[in-house]
Image (cartoon, rainbow, N blue to C red):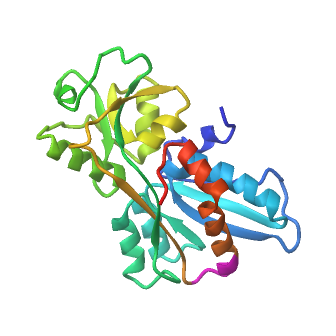
Amino acid sequence: MFARRALVSALAPVILFSACTSSSESQGQTTLNVYAASSLATPFAFAALAYEKNHPGVKVQFNLGASSDLARFIQEGAPADVFASADITNMDKVESQDLLDSQSFIFATTYLEIIVEKGNPLNISSLQDLTDPDLIFVTTNPEVPIGRYTAEALEKASVTVTPDSLESNVKGIMLKVASGEADAGIVYHSEVIAADDQVEGVEIPTEFNIVAEFPIGIIKNSANKKEAQRFIDYLLSPVGQSLLTQYGFQTP
């Protein structure tokens, strides 16, 4: 398993880490602060390592967490250069306060899956199965994109499920299920891929599923706008797009 995955899978609402493996910063080094939805952790980590290798003197530092938390921090003046959200709603919170250098755009999408323990010991096969009162189901609050997407999918299927706990972000859902503390949750297909066989995904039919759209933008008060644009351009390059698709995302 990728060494940094353990870091980005923590239950803390926001995780700070750098793709750079050096323990010290050299003079003149540029630090690019990327605020990104935790669901983007794995492909972004690999992208940053490759980007740093090809751009000596640049360190890509991530603040990962629920998009709702990240949007609030940016609104409060956190030093961000790039914001990648798991939904349009939280990007709009930043954009509506004129905090973006230019209009955001969708750079990736994914869809939802039910997440269960490896081997699916409870034989969960549908959204209806999640109504079992003996089943431990976890999600997030509706401000977090995956929590809202989950509520929308359940509503489309006319299914009512009362969660047993609310996690901080999609990584928290994955960890609860992987550890056996929960029986099921709903996450992104990309999260099932990034979990590296710790869990299994159960398909949600298209008529009940949700397409999760991931927008990205440069923060207006960034001191590194050119570098921010270069990093975004890398994500949009064939190599960057390949990383996203490898980890369960669809690209424009």
Q: Nearer the viewer, residue 228 or 79?
A: 228
- Quadrant for the N terminus in the image: top right
Q: Main SS of the magenta segment?
A: loop
Residue at the location (47% across, 51% down)?
250
> For the magenta stretch, what is the residue range?
221-226
132 w.r.t. 103: above or below = above
Q: Residue at position x 80%, y 65% from top?
A: 55
Q: Residue at x 42, y 57 (%)?
A: 86
Q: Is residue 77 magenta?
A: no
Assess whether residue 222 is covered by the magenta stretch.
yes
Percent coordinates x, y for residue 40 in the rendering:
53, 51
Image spot of residue 19 (x, y percent): 71, 53
Is 170 placed above or below 67 here?
above
In the image: residue 20, left or right of residue 98: right
**Does any portion of residue 182 appear in the rendered image?**
yes
Going by the image, does 208 lie left or right of 7?
left
Q: x%, y% of residue 36?
A: 53, 59
Q: Is residue 2 above or below residue 42?
A: above
Which residue is pictured at 61% across the width and 37% down the height?
A: 6
Determine whether 21 is above or below 103 in the image.
Answer: above
In the rendered structure, the answer to whether residue 41 lies left or right of residue 157 reads right
Q: Quadrant of residue 187?
A: top left
**In the image, residue 143 lies at what x, y percent?**
31, 58
